[in-house]
Image (cartoon, rainbow, N blue to C red):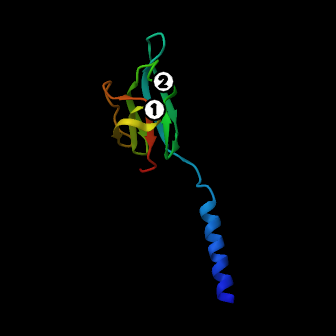
């Protein structure tokens, strides 16, 4: 009887632990990119210490029907990131290393996934 009670208590504790949400973390550093504003001028935007892991659709270029993709991403965070050609981390993708050099203007993106991997 005692073994059954101990086992039930252990399983209950395990179930509660698994049900708790994981603590959120952030990539340390900045992820920046260039986009063209509605007036046709290039603008630079930066995500500071973005939430990780997770996907971020870049707000300035989220609608493929009304904007050109962003370009020239620079991953200056401590994590690997994947950049995507479409919103919601879909489409073609490329991986950028942590604290890497800026990518060229030919690399287009509309969303980025912070992997949580350093």
For the residue carrying disc 2, how many other residues have a C-alpha within 10 Å: few (<14), some (14-19), or many (20+)?
some
Q: In percent of the image, x 62 and y 67: which residue is there?
A: 15
Disc assigned to residue 63: 2
Which residue is situated farthest in the bottom direction here? 1
Which residue is situated farthest in the top direction here? 39
Question: 3 or 52, which lies in front?
Answer: 3
Q: Is residue 102 left or right of residue 31?
A: left
Up/down of 101 relative to 71, above or below:
below
Up/down of 39 relative to 3, above or below:
above
Task: Determine the CA span between mark 1 and mark 2.
Answer: 8 Å
**Rendering coords of residue 9 (x, y %):** 67, 77
**Rendering coords of residue 30 (x, y %):** 47, 36
**Rendering coords of residue 72 (x, y %):** 36, 27
| Residue 68 image-quadrant placement | top left
Disc assigned to residue 32: none
Up/down of 32 relative to 79, above or below:
above
Q: Are marks 1 and 2 in contact (CB under 8 Å)?
A: yes
**Rendering coords of residue 49 (x, y %):** 52, 39
| Residue 78 image-quadrant placement | top left
Up/down of 5 relative to 17, above or below:
below
Q: Earlier in the sequence, mark 1 or mark 2?
A: 2
Q: Quadrant of the N terminus?
A: bottom right
Question: Label 2's element?
Answer: loop
Question: 15 or 78, which lies in front?
Answer: 15
Question: Label 1's element?
Answer: helix
Q: In percent of the image, x 47 and y 16: which residue is there?
A: 37
Disc assigned to residue 87: 1
Q: Is residue 17 left or right of residue 111?
A: right
């Amino acid at each position: 009887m005692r073994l059954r009670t101990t086992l039930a208590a252990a399983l209950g504790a395990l179930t509660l632990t698994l049900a708790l949400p994981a603590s959120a973390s952030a990539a340390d550093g900045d992820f920046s990119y260039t986009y063209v504003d509605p007036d046709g001028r290039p603008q630079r935007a930066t995500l500071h210490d973005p939430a990780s892991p997770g996907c971020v659709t870049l707000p300035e270029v989220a609608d493929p029907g009304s904007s050109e993709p962003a370009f020239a991403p620079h991953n200056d965070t401590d994590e690997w990131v994947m950049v995507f050609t479409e919103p919601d981390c879909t489409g073609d993708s490329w991986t950028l290393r942590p604290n890497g050099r800026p990518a060229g203007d030919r690399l287009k993106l509309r969303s980025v996934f912070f992997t949580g991997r350093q």
